[in-house]
């Protein structure tokens, strides 16, 4: 008689039979960067996650590297007074975030540094593209994203992460990088980025919520999966090095489809809302937050990701170290 429980009978056989393993090598930590020095503020809707000034970001990266975390995605918190309709601060080489990126890369050349390419943190409209008469302009936005990408590449970072969902941006940015001798700077494309309610706490962290409307004319409809394959096909053809699905947990089927159909690394973004839900339920004593964290990350890996952007990166790395 076939008895599946035989392979679950002891810890030893469970470990031996385990198909998917979570490793610190899979984790990328998103970091919220503040202007100034010795500044640290907790994101209220993300317990345990802090916005940090450059000096403290350097310390954080150092600690994470010691834990074995290799990837970091840096998001600047931009003061309202620096925002404008064309996100001009995003490519001003004197602006704090570009100087900080340079410093980070100089201090830790071995750390893999990813940046976010989209207008929202720098835009007075809080949208990812240029707004005109309530519409988000696609082709005009590409020009700004090009300048932003180039300014970021000039700091020495390893990979840009276009998260804006404009059409043709991967090809456009690849050309801009190549024409300026940044052919070694990679592109992690936010390929299947859904118009999701799970980004709420991130927008609190950066104070970057749209000032009007929503992002449904550029981010994807959560009901669709064929569209994710179309986006992936375009980004693949346009030269993306990594295809990302975002959010992760409600979109495991999309991760699986991309993994099956495209033979380049697949990333998933375990977004702010997914982090906060576990933290909030944990604080209430409704579930075991550490077990829920590991189960979530393992599920994202099982679906087919090669790397996971997650606010849990440090905690998960600490946990993995303890159980080894
Ligand atoms: C910027 C961007 C967003 C996130 C990453 N890059 C917010 C958005 O598109 O509104 C969300 C990440 C998270 O929720 O953790 N375009």
Image: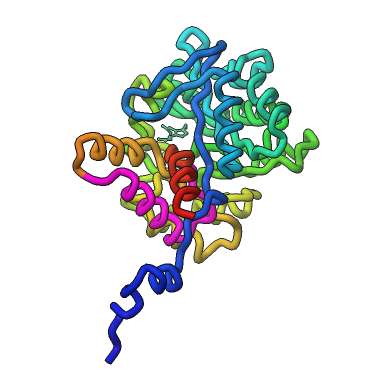
Q: Is residue 303 above or below residue 54?
A: below
The front one of 100 and 285 is: 285
Q: Is residue 199 above or below residue 302?
A: above
Report x, y in % for residue 221.
35, 46
State yes or no: residue 112 in magenta: no
The front one of 65 and 222 is: 65
Report x, y in % for residue 149.
65, 31
Kindly give the residue lying farthest to the bottom in the view shown.
1
Q: Which image quarter has ligand 1?
A: top left
In the rendered structure, which segment of residues is drawn in magenta?
A: 287-310
Report x, y in % for residue 302.
43, 61
Give the prevailing secondary structure in the magenta stretch: helix
Q: Is residue 209 visible?
A: no
**Count of numbered circles on the image:** 0
Residue at position x 59%, y 62% in the image: 263
Kindly give the residue lying farthest to the right in the view shown.
181
State yes or no: residue 308 in magenta: yes
Classify residue 296 as left or right of residue 93: left
Report x, y in % for residue 47.
34, 29
Q: Is residue 85 above or below residue 171?
A: above
Residue at position x 60%, y 25% in the image: 58
Q: Is residue 89 visible?
A: yes
């Amino acid at each position: 008689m076939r008895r599946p429980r035989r392979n679950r009978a002891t810890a030893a056989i469970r470990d031996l039979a385990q198909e998917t393993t979570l490793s610190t090598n899979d984790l990328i930590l998103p970091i919220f960067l503040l202007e100034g020095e010795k500044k640290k503020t907790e994101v209220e809707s993300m317990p345990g996650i802090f916005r940090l000034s450059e000096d403290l970001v350097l310390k954080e990266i150092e600690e994470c590297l010691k834990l074995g975390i290799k990837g970091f995605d840096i998001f600047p918190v931009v003061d309202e007074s620096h925002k404008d309709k064309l996100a001009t601060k995003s490519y001003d080489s004197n602006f704090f975030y570009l100087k900080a990126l340079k410093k980070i890369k100089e201090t830790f050349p071995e750390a893999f540094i990813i940046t976010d390419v989209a207008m929202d943190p720098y835009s007075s409209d809080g949208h990812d593209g240029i707004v005109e008469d309530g519409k988000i302009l696609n082709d005009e936005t590409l020009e700004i994203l090009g300048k932003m990408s180039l300014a970021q590449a000039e700091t020495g970072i390893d990979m840009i992460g276009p998260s804006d969902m404009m059409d043709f941006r991967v090809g456009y940015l690849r050309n801009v990088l190549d024409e300026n001798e940044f052919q070694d700077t990679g592109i992690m494309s936010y390929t299947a980025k859904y118009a999701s309610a799970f980004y709420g706490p991130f927008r609190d962290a950066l104070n970057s919520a749209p000032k009007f409307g929503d992002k449904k004319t550029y981010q994807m409809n959560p009901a669709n999966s064929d569209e994710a394959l179309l986006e992936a096909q375009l980004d693949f053809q346009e030269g993306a090095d990594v295809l990302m699905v975002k959010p992760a947990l409600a979109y495991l089927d999309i991760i699986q489809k991309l993994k099956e159909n495209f033979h380049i690394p697949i990333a998933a973004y375990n977004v702010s809302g997914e982090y906060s839900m576990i933290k909030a339920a944990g604080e209430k004593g409704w579930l075991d937050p550490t077990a829920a964290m590991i189960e979530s990350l393992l599920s994202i890996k099982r679906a087919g990701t090669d790397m996971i952007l997650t606010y849990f990166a440090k905690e998960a790395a600490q946990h993995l170290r303890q159980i080894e």
